[in-house]
Image (spheres, grey):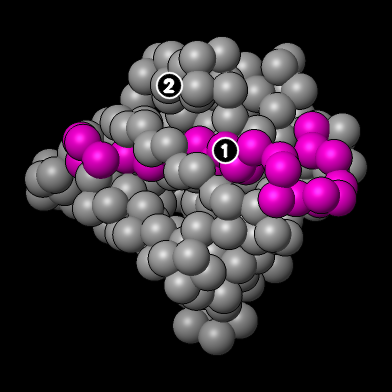
Amino acid sequence: MKTLALKVVALGLAVAVAAGGLAPAVGAADKPPIKIGLITPKTGNFAQMGIDMADGFKLYMAEIDYQVAGRKIELIEEDEGAVPATAVTKVRKLITHDKVNIVVGLFMAAAAYAAAPVAQEAEVPLVITIAASDDLTQRKASKYLARVSFTGGELGHAAGDYAYRKLGWRKVSAIAMDYGWGHETAGAFQRVFEELGGQVVQKIWTPVNTTDFGPYVASLKP
């Protein structure tokens, strides 16, 4: 977690400088603090993940005494709620009201897809720490956006290859959450698995807030 937080800070500053968002730290003592907006889900189904994300980030901030390159860091936190509309509102608030230099975080793919354009239009660097949406760094890539985590496609490709080559599976049914990340991960699995000769005979999509998967498991084809 410490290494990840260091990478996030370093990458965020690099993106900010490259995009023109921060001047080099000459006479840093006279400069205002670097404002980082940290947005994670603290309510909803993914609250614990968001709390862990924020705790890890703040742990590293404390270790470096909330300063980098001779400048103080001011951290402003917001709750993504794992809801796209909320993420948009909170990212816009961080940028327009709090005047942050960098936005960091975002857990849910749908929230990241919705909020990323807000940062890009404002030309404020966004460093995504979890949201694994493939197209954020592919078809929708931007010089104001970077990610330090994996993508859904990476997981799906590896799982499809492993299922066919190592487990010897030839037919599978897939259950995935019905939003961007679930579709991208399942799609990547299917592509690799079927290219190798396997067959995905059924795909079941569950609502994001599903806690009881019993009915879905019962509907699987033999």
Tag 2: amino acid: Lys
User: Which residue is labeled 2 in the image?
Assistant: 90
Quarter of the image where one finds residue 49: bottom left
Residue extending farthest to the bottom is: 166
Query: Magenta stretch containing residue 8, yes or no?
Result: no
Name the side, left or right, on which 185 lies relative to 203.
Answer: right
The structure residue drawn at horizontal position 70% and vertical position 50%, both measured from the top left corner, is 29
- The secondary structure that most of the magenta stretch takes on is loop
Mark 1 near mark 2, Cβ–Cβ under 8 Å?
A: no
Q: Which residue range is magenta in the image? A: 21-45
Task: For the C terminus, give its image quadrant.
Answer: bottom left
Quarter of the image where one finds residue 42: top left
Q: Is residue 128 visible?
A: no
Name the side, left or right, on which 122 lies relative to 176.
Answer: right
User: What is the secondary structure assignment of the residue under circle 2?
Assistant: helix
The structure residue drawn at horizontal position 71% and vertical position 35%, both measured from the top left corner, is 125
Tag 1: amino acid: Lys
Residue 219 appears at what percent x and percent y? 20, 44
Residue 41 appears at what percent x and percent y? 32, 39
- Residue 215: give its label: none
User: Which residue is labeled 1 in the image?
Assistant: 35
Give the mark, 1 or 2, whose residue is nearer the N terminus. Answer: 1
